[in-house]
Amino acid sequence: MGSVIEPVNKTDKKSKYRVYTLIALAISILVLLLFIFNIGNALMGSVPTFSDVVETTVFLVIWLVYGVVMGYKREKGFIKFVSLYWGLTGLISITSKLMAPIGKWAIIVIPIEALNFAPTYGLDYFTHVNVFQPLYGLIHVVPPWASGTTGFLLGYLLKKIKFGMIIPPPKPI
């Protein structure tokens, strides 16, 4: 007989995305707490230091590890989550630069930029180029997104290698 396909529970998907979001925010908060002395540089726009580069590296490595774990667990919704999370963060950043004169927008923008852009402020150490201000946020969005998705793909491949799906075991003679 045919197999029975169970319907996907939408509340399960929503709760997974909530957990993903909480973990993403926890990563940002953890890195900010570890490097609390660097947050002033990022928020005040000071010249980034080598310490900011170390903070950014730790942040990107944690996102990479998060992605590896999710890829190893075959959590396919993670790629969609990472893309939405960093896509919305970039969109908010771009629109905040365009809508800077509107003061009420700062209520939303300041926490998002503090949580998501302060840990990646060390990237500015390498980008001394004057970038069109709305696109500046993309410099801080693409590397964590790439780190998470690359980690996912690595974890996915590690799972395949572990179980011999990529390189099949030799056939018995």
Image: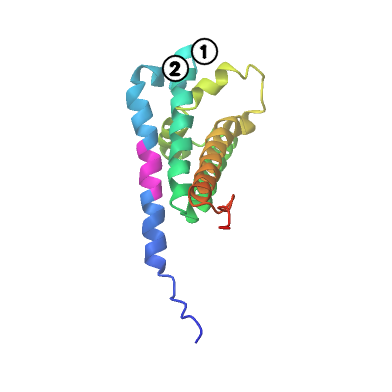
Residue 47's mark? Answer: 1
Where is residue 80 drawn, in percent x and y?
Answer: 53, 53
Q: Is residue 7 above or below residue 171?
A: below
Question: Which residue is at the front of the view, 55 or 135?
Answer: 55
Residue 47 colored in magenta in the image: no
Label 2 crowding class (10 Å Cα cut-off): few <14, some 14-19, many 20+?
some
**Label 1 element class:** loop
Q: Residue at left 56%, top 20%?
A: 124
The residue type indicated by label 1 comes to: Val
When asked about the image quadrant of residue 66, the answer is top left
Label 1 crowding class (10 Å Cα cut-off): few <14, some 14-19, many 20+?
few
Q: Is residue 17 above or below residue 51?
A: below
Residue behind mark 2: 41
- The segment highlighted magenta reads 20-26
Q: Residue at left 63%, top 33%?
A: 135
Q: Are marks 2 and 1 in contact (CB under 8 Å)?
A: yes
Q: Can the viewer see residue 31? A: yes
Is most of the magenta stretch helix, strand or loop? helix
Where is residue 98 drawn, in percent x and y?
Answer: 60, 36
The residue type indicated by label 2 comes to: Asn
When asked about the image quadrant of residue 37, the answer is top left
**Residue that protrudes farthest toward the bottom in the picture:** 1
Where is residue 143 drawn, in percent x and y?
Answer: 56, 33
**Label 2 element class:** helix
